[in-house]
Image (tube, rainbow, N blue to C red):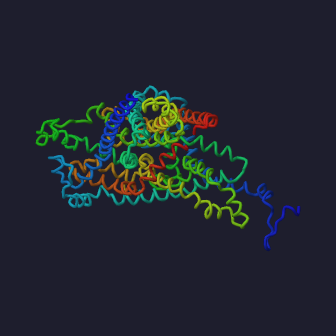
Amino acid sequence: MVDNKVTVGNKTLYSRKRRNKVSYSRYGYLFIAPFFIVYAIFHLYPLLYTFYISFTDYLYASFNLVGPDFVGLKNYIEVIKNPRVTGAIKNTAILWIVNYIPQLLLALLLAAWFTDPRLNIRRQGTFKVMVFMPNIMTAATIAVLFYALFSYPVGPINSMLAKLNIIPKEYFLRPEEYGIEFFRSPMATRLIISFIQFWMWYGHTMIILIAGIMGIDPEIFESAEIDGATGGQIFRNITLPLIKPIMLYTLVTSLIGGLQMFDIPKLLLNGGPDYKTETITMYIFGQAMESRNYGKSAAVSIVLFILTSILSLFIFYLFKEEDNVAEEKGVW
Amino acid sequence: MKRTIYYDLSYSRSLKAKTVFIYIVCILLSILSIFPFWVMFVNATRSSLQIKTSFSLLPSKYLIENWKTMINREAFNVFLGFKNSFFIATCSTILTVYFSALTAYGLAVYQFKLRKSAFTFIIAVLMVPTQVAAVGFYRLMASMNLNNTFIPLIVPAIAAPAVVFFMHQYIKSALLIEIVESARIDGAGELYIFNRIALPIFKPAIATQIIFSYITSWNNFFMPGMILTDVKKYTLPLMVQILKSDRFRTDYGVVYLGLSLTVLPLIIVYLLLSKHIIRGVALGSVKG
């Protein structure tokens, strides 16, 4: 017993060993409590509640809130049959693919150039600052800006095309007649949305890929160079296989982000023309806030949740495996 | 021998050509990144008639006139939006960063039974997007009479799993336990140790997270769009919608001025902190 006591000045303290066991674990719970309490109330409960609502009739019918009344799978069946929902899933997929493939290719190309010591590209920092800038700008502002830029009859893109003689100069006199109405065409609108996403995100992907390549042991490159490999060979046979996990990471995070695509299509044309640019989250938002049919909105939310969970699990296992591999190989 | 020299010369020449090509591509891409913003700022200084009848990349002199028109149209109150955005982003960033550091510290420094399960839970919910729980969240806030207030946009910021994860990775690398233990011997309380000793050590991680949390909150459109319906409560991203409405149909100059004002603070912050931001992006990916 005496061993457990330490006297400092006029205070009696118990030895560290004993105090550790008795009181410190309490602080652990105390310190993480705010997070878990707030998470439970504002994140977990709404998620479970959304799950519950998805099995109920819960809506405003002639200004009266009805429900929630349990109806089983009714919302899910209605939602799957609804061409607007399947259309929204298709639109989201198209908008994502058309932006992601060029985004990854350009980011890879730039990353290969910037990390090649033989090319020794200067002013990389300035270039990164420039191309990353659109990424942190308010997406809502960017959407309205592009809406204004591409607008018809009066819009800078139209007047630029007229100035470059791509459309007749008479445009400046009679814009209605000679201007291009971009937002009437579903394809043009989709391309503009995909372009904005591409333009906002390729710098981000590039920075991540460069960081991944810089993380590779330089000795591997050096010995490849001594063996006489060309830049292209090194990139194909060494860099690409080694950054595969990082590429998969950017792929899956971009996919999860893409499933939530909202700000740009919402503020550009609100899903138009003819719902051809309506995304999944726009449908969820519209059902909840405009149609005020919470049951249906919740059913689509749960579908989105399942899709996202599958993808997240994939990342989780990817990194678990990568950790094991890294320990064996000592690459990262 | 001869052959080798010949090979090297042509090789270095093609390398030079390739380098020139790369610089040209980089310059074009940089222009592409800036071009829309440039047109926006230039058009903010041009009159609606000029915008309608010509295209120019050089500023004109109608900035003040556009400004006056904008102030007279009370519909688009950029200052109110700025004030609301500033309030929400500041409060939620402080909460996110402080409580994430506290949670990560609690998980890293103390040994307790549920520690591992708590950490696994945080990783498991890392990727859950807020949108999937939005309907439930909206109805919950409606039943608590909190819609159209700032509380639903601020208080949930206390629980930010991704920030906790980032901080945890950082704390693990910053050797902490010994410092904590010696502070305990000096008789310091646990919360005091966290606030006065641990937090200053986390400064680099905190700085990165302040920037990203602030920008995320500032740009958020989905949640405020659900919760805030009163125009007086609008944040900047919500305010921007007004510029698309019929009230500004022919005021081209005013629209560009309004848009410019909503991103001007971000551009200034970005130019000051771009190095940190880009380093943070690279860091977050490799570690996370």
Q: Residue A274, image x and y in percent?
A: 31, 32
* Above or below, comparing residue A23 to residue A292 in the picture: below
Identify the image quadrant of the N terminus of chain B. Answer: top left
Task: Identify which residue is drawn at 36% across, 36% down.
Answer: B12
Q: Residue B205, image x and y in percent?
A: 54, 54
Q: Residue furthest bottom?
A: A10
Q: Residue furthest top?
A: A81
Q: State which quadrant residue A280 falls in.
A: top left
* Nearer-the-camera pick, B152 or A318: A318
* Above or below, comparing residue A219 to residue B79 in the picture: above
Task: Identify which residue is drawn at 59% across, 33% down.
Answer: A317
Q: Residue furthest front?
A: B1
Residue B86 lies left or right of residue B29; in this view the side is: right
Residue B13 lies left or right of residue B281; in this view the side is: left
Q: Residue A254, image x and y in percent?
A: 46, 37
* Above or below, comparing residue B247 to residue A280 in the picture: below
Could you tell me if residue B103 is visible in this image? no
* Nearer-the-camera pick, B60 or B235: B60
